[in-house]
Image (cartoon, helix red, strand yellow):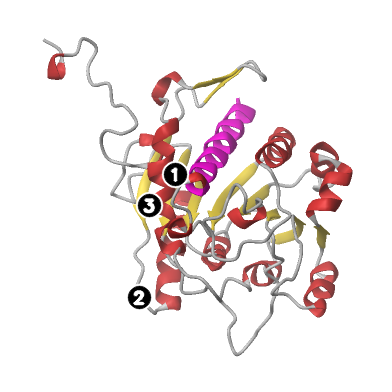
Amino acid sequence: MAEHGYEGGRLNLPFVGISTFGKYPYVQDWGAIDADVAVLGAPYDFGTQWRSGARFGPRSVREASTLFSFGHAGAYDHEDDVTYLENARIVDIGDADIIHTDTEGSHRNIEAGVRAILAAGAMPVVIGGDHSINIPCINAFSEQMPFHIVQIDAHLDFVDERHGVRYGHGNPLRRAAEKSYVTGMTQVGIRNVSSTAKEGYEAAREMGSDIFSVRQFRALGPLAMADRVPEDVPIYLTIDIDAFDPSIAPGTGTPSHGGFLYYEILEFIAEIVKHHKVVGIDLVEVAPDYDHSGSTAILAAQVLLNTIGRVLHARG
């Protein structure tokens, strides 16, 4: 007799069971990661300057991702005529330990999680948390090959220091640009009033950034925009959910109108991964309490699963 009387075993429908990312296996021992992709939660939001709540982002994105938990059958895309995520070797290693009010200690724990993933030869996918969690993620790559950062965001996040703060969610891309192993940045979606002043934009360009607003991105189109990403260099992808328009992603701490729609970014990412090795991904700033419909978390999960699927497909 099959388990629970169902011929073929458990159905494991999306609303049943434990909400790991995509319902992929949970690995508690960070020394025993055996996968192509490992998902780490970074429920840290002490870097926010206005509305907090992104500490609940990893939990909400994981729950939303169960809607797309196709298991080993994969997900067929009739437009591409490709079954993505078929037999994908993905694991969820849980969350980095966060110490309330302790930025340095929390960031060290996030960095340790990313380093464990890299040591296992897997690609890290980190769910934030506010955008400051990108700082320990990039720190973890200090012994890896150089790479280019592609940032999808409403804000430049290139503040050097303000009020003595150097590790908040307005600082991560500045901290990344200081790394010898970061070769440059493509920053898209930047718009409206920003936390970064004019001198920050000037410094970003001097340090190798290519900066585009949503309107400038649309004038080029996703494919031409992807062509501007330097060739022959791996990329690290950092996605702030506020890059998307708040009409589809209201659940974030600093919403900014005039943002992207889903397919613009999917087409941009799909083109990038065809021509570049992706070495890491983070998705940040989902704050579910500002979106009772859950659409922001669903968007985040859909972006991540589609991105991971395309990365693995490009690897063959």
Tell which circle, 1 or 2, labels the residue nearer the N-terminal end: 1
Q: CA distance from mark 1 to mark 2?
A: 25 Å
Left or right of 302, for residue 185 = right
> What's the distance in space between the residues labelled 3 and 1, CA to CA?
16 Å
Q: Are marks 3 and 2 in contact (CB under 8 Å)?
A: no
Q: Nearer the viewer, mark 1 or mark 2?
A: 2
Quadrant occupied by the N terminus = top left
Highlighted magenta segment, given as a residue range: 296-316
Residue 251 drawn at (x, y percent): 52, 56
Q: Tell me which amino acid carries mark 2.
A: His
70 to the left or right of 227: left
Q: Which mark is residue 294?
A: none
Q: Helix or strand or loop: what does disc 2 sit on?
A: loop
Residue at mark 1: 38
The reply to whether the magenta stretch includes residue 52 is no
* Mark 2, residue position: 100
Measuring 23% from the left and 21% from the top, which residue is drawn there? 10
Q: Label 3, on which residue? A: 59
State the predominant SS element of the stretch in magenta: helix
The percent position of residue 56, horizontal first and vertical second, equals 40, 59
168 above or below 133?
below
Amino acid type, residue under disc 1 in the picture: Ala
What amino acid does circle 3 point to? Arg
User: Which mark is first along the chain, 1 or 3?
Assistant: 1
The residue lying at 28 percent from left, 26 percent from top is 12
302 falls in the magenta region = yes
**Dots 1, 2 in contact, CB < 8 A:** no
